[in-house]
Image: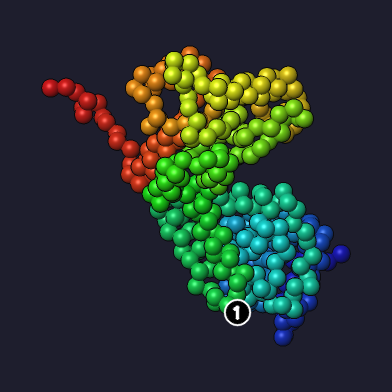
Amino acid sequence: MENLKSKINKLLSERPIPVEQIVEALSFASIKGDKTDLFVLKKLAELHDVFDQYLAIPALVLLPAWGLDGIEIVIKQAFKGPHKSAALSLLACLSKGKIPTSQDVLFLNPEYEKFIKYNISESIATTVTQKIRSYFLESLDDPFDKSSLIWSISTLGILPESNENRTNYFNFYVDLLIDSHFLLNETKISEFETLLNSSPEKEEVLQKYLTDNSIFIDPFIIELRSKHELGDDFITDYVLRRINNEYILIEIENSTDTIFTKDGQLSADLSKAISQVRDFQAWISDNIAYAQKKLPGIRRPSGLVIIGRNINLSEIEVKRLDEENYSRRGHIKIVTYDDLLNQAKVVHQNMISKPIVLKSRDQKTI
């Protein structure tokens, strides 16, 4: 039986070249998914002479039919090969779980859309996005790769604005490069401070803001579950997972709530919040197998209570709160909204300026 390589070479020798027959043969090969045919697709996708728009682009678009093996080739071509704009558009399309069309991929002939017959699962779409992010992180560490990356993305930005799909894909890459979930600037900080100074009557107002701007809770967050249910027993305000896979159970009170009573005892609001977090922790411990189905890897989560403001505390109360946190050894930590605000200011400062590095000679006293 004639293999794909022989068949394509034979068709390429004909005059005029039967482009549609070649694309149809590639499509048939993509349905089979034989890895020995992947090399043929790769070579055709790299063509950059007269067949750019006719053979290379359909071959490129069919590569994902081979799963992650084909997608890896598309990723490499998107940043270091020919047809960067088409490859970038294709990847952005795949990340949304969408089968590409001529409206998505530059120079894809509409007549060839009928040959694109693979499916993109949700897991594949997620993996595509993760692989793009991973490539970004690697590229930004190398001056040449960083320059190539920025140039590749910019090519999408100069495509005709009449095509809404491709413009959206340009924005998709900009959002990946500068993750809006971790956007922290002076405007955001001022916005949060203004919200606190308005003394909102309901804690739900603060919770909505923190949900939309989770970097204020923790700059190392990778997952935030709002109103997460612990079986039929409890509902948390938040369950947070950090980059080290540490889980934190969070209870939110209002910024206007008091932390201490007049005689220096913990307020009723704070005591209730601490008790709730303890209940959450105990439930996780008693139902660990069930909990890990929803929260993979959770074992002994720490707790966090967000309540009140530092500006309402006396100097003695600030020390009292510090001692309270020390005595709990991080098992349940109590922070104020001002603590979150000040933490954000420090994180922002580190984003705009390099940290101070003192060498041994700088630290010597005269």
Residue 258: percent from left, percent from top: 48, 27
Q: Is residue 139 visible?
A: no
**SS for callout 1:** loop
Q: Nearer the viewer, residue 205 or 338?
A: 205
Q: In screen coordinates, is 354 left or right of 156? A: left
Is 145 or 169 nearer to us in this picture? 169
Q: Which amino acid, mark 1? A: Val
Q: Is residue 333 above or below residue 130?
A: above
Q: Outermost residue toward the bottom?
A: 16
Give the x, y percent position of residue 6.
76, 68
What is the quadrant of residue 362 in the picture? top left
Q: Which residue is mark 1?
A: 50
Residue 355 relative to residue 108: left or right: left
Say how the picture is coloured: rainbow
Q: Where is the C terminus found, in terms of image quarters?
A: top left
Q: Residue furthest front?
A: 262
Q: Nearer the viewer, residue 294 or 51?
A: 294
Instruction: State the residue at coordinates (42%, 38%).
Output: 341
Counting every numbered tag in the picture gives 1
Q: Is 308 left or right of 13, judged from the image as shown?
A: left
Q: Quadrant of residue 166 in the image?
A: bottom right
Q: Residues within 10 Å of mark 1 (few under 14, many from 20)?
A: few
Q: Find residue 123 and report its horizontal and vertical position in percent.
A: 72, 48
Q: Is residue 227 above or below residue 175?
A: above
The residue that appears at 76% across and 30% down in the rendered structure is 231
Residue lying at the far right in this picture: please name it.
Answer: 1
- In the rendered image of this protein, does residue 202 appear above or below residue 248? below
> What residue is at 75 percent from the left and 73 percent from the top?
113
Q: Position of residue 310 (x, y in %)?
A: 40, 30
Quarter holding the N terminus is bottom right
Question: Can residue 290 be seen in the rendering of this structure?
Answer: yes
